Each structure stands twice: as structure tokens, then as C-alpha cells.
Amino acid sequence: MRFEEVLVESPHSHVSSIKSRVQEAINGIRPALQMDGGDCELVEVAPDGTAKVLLKGACMGCPSSTMTVTMGIERRIKASVPEIKRVVAVEA
């Protein structure tokens, strides 16, 4: 077998695949957040399956932001990326 035929997968490639899928899920919900003057940015995907997001604009400090994270963002991400166990909002 030639070296070129051997695929060596980096341990980080799985995490980067998860991160890109989480980003795609967030991109799908961002228009709804932006219609209300808010936004969301992916900060990190932790090894324990936690996606950390930063709420922006009108979402920052909004009394409904907890519901937005759990019922909107988390639900969307978990449906698209089952490896994600929870989503938490972090502060800048």
C-alpha cells in the first residue's frame, strides 16, 4: 500500500466537523434572531458536547434570551448535530 492511499485522520477533524455542522445550524436560525434585532455567534464546541454561543444585539440582556437559547438555538443545533448535549450562552 502506498502512503498516498492511507488516510490518516487527525483527532481534531471530528471536532472541526461537529463545529462546522453547529455553525450551519446557527446560520439557519440567525435570520429569525436578526429580524428581532439580535444575533448569535458560535464561540466554541467543547469536548464534552457543549456548544458555547455569544448572543448579540437585542438578545443581550433580553429577559427572553434563556428561552431563545434553549427552545430556539439549542433545539435547532441538537436536531442537526446529535453529538451536542447542551448549548450555553457566554458573555463577551
Image: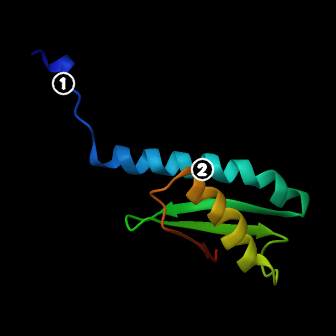
Q: Secondary structure at mark 2?
A: helix
Q: Residue at x 14, y 20 (%)?
A: 3
Residue 49 as seen in the image, left or right of residue 20? left
Residue 68 horizontal side relative to residue 47, left or right: right
Q: Which residue is mark 2?
A: 23
Separation (CA) of disc 2 from disc 1 = 29 Å
Q: Quadrant of residue 91?
A: bottom right
Q: Amino acid at mark 1?
A: Val
Q: Earlier in the sequence, mark 2 or mark 1?
A: 1
The x and y percentages for residue 63 are 81, 84
Q: What residue would you read off at disc 1?
A: 6
Left or right of 9 on screen, residue 27? right
Quarter of the figure that contains the C terminus: bottom right
Report the number of discs: 2
Q: Please state the horizontal and vertical placement of residue 22, each as a whole percent of the image.
A: 56, 52
The answer to whether the residue labelled 2 contacts the one labelled 1, judged by CB atoms less than 8 Å apart, is no
